[in-house]
Amino acid sequence: MSVWIFELLSPTSNYIHNLATSMPSTDILIAEDNYDDYSALQYIFGSIHLNHISDSTEAYNKALQLKLLVDGASFLVYEDKQAYRPIKLGRIREGDGYFFTVADQITPTRFDVDFSINPVVEKESQSTVAKLIQLARQNEFVLNILLILSQGMDFRNLYQALDECKSFLKGKRKIENIGIDNAKLNRFTHTANNFATIGLLSRHGTLAQQPPANPLSLSESQELITDLIRIILRDYFDLKEFQMEKIILAGNLDDLF
């Protein structure tokens, strides 16, 4: 068994500090890593779901997949979608060894971490991010939503998330009856599909479709799809509350204290 630890290079924000101090390490570890009182504060990333892996390159590329869950949960939880910056991993080490660089890093497009190999000890947590990751381990819909949102909340990714929600609700409930603004939903789909309105941000090229008379802005679209996902998580997964915090970006970790 190996314990793989990764440098967490960014983002530098109060958000990462809060994860390090409040999120249990059930699935993913984010922690402070100080050698002594004189060293600059650093953070590390790790996961029990990598412990069976003996090859550092494989461990690194699986870690890149796992960090997407944190990114996706973060985009979902925080109100200001522009304030969050995806996590960036640095070098890797095994146990208490020295950090070294992995050359063959693969940008993940699919998720194939096997959660069944290394069983976890469930821990109660008030961290919404931790709860979302736990749900993702157990449910494909939540996993897919976090993976989609990990890429950011632009029109195309938001539409993918909408498709995922529709697929989940099929046979359970009509999306029109779930409690969101249906007029806004129609404006969103029209805007997201219309090249003449949002150009390269759209899901399609030019179609035989008139531009929307009243396009839905990106921030309104983010709020709409976020509300839809939260309703599903509340009604079908008993996730009733989301912690909301302001993200303070800092150039120096000392700026956070």
Image (spheres, rainbow, N blue to C red):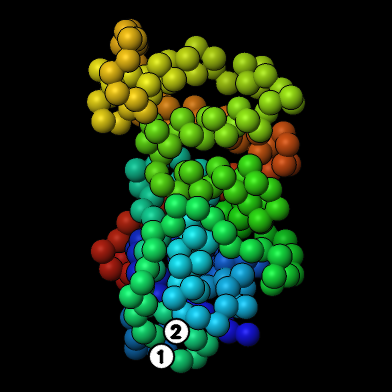
Mark 1 and mark 2: Cα distance apart in space: 6 Å
| Amino acid type, mark 2 | Arg
Residue located at (36% from left, 53% from top): 85
Give the percent coordinates (x, y) of residue 29: 55, 70
Amino acid carrying mark 1 in the image: Tyr
Residue 255 horizontal side relative to residue 30, left or right: left
Q: Position of residue 114 (x, y in %)?
A: 64, 63
Above or below for 4 versus 20: below
Could you say whether the residue bearing mark 2 is in a helix, strand or loop? strand
Q: Is residue 77 above or below residue 225?
A: below
Q: In terms of secondary structure, where does tag 1 sit?
A: loop
Q: Residue at x 32, y 56 (%)?
A: 249
**Residue 6: image location, x then y, percent:** 44, 76
Evaluate if marks 1 and 2 touch, with contact meaning CB atoms under 8 Å apart: yes
Q: Nearest the camera: 153 or 248?
A: 153
Residue topped by disc 2: 93
Q: For mark 1, what is the residue?
A: 98
Residue at the image position 70 percent from the left and 53 percent from the top: 138
Rendered view: 69 above or below 173: below
Specify the quadrant that holds the N terminus: bottom right
**Quarter of the picture holding the C terminus:** bottom left
Q: Is residue 106 above or below residue 32?
A: above
Asked whether 168 or 88 is in front, the reply is 168
Considering only order in the chain, which callout, 2 or 1, is on the residue closer to the N terminus?
2
Q: Residue at the location (49% across, 67% down)?
A: 63
Structural crowding at the residue carrying mark 1, measured as other residues with C-alpha within 10 Å and reported as few (<14), some (14–19) or many (≥20) = few
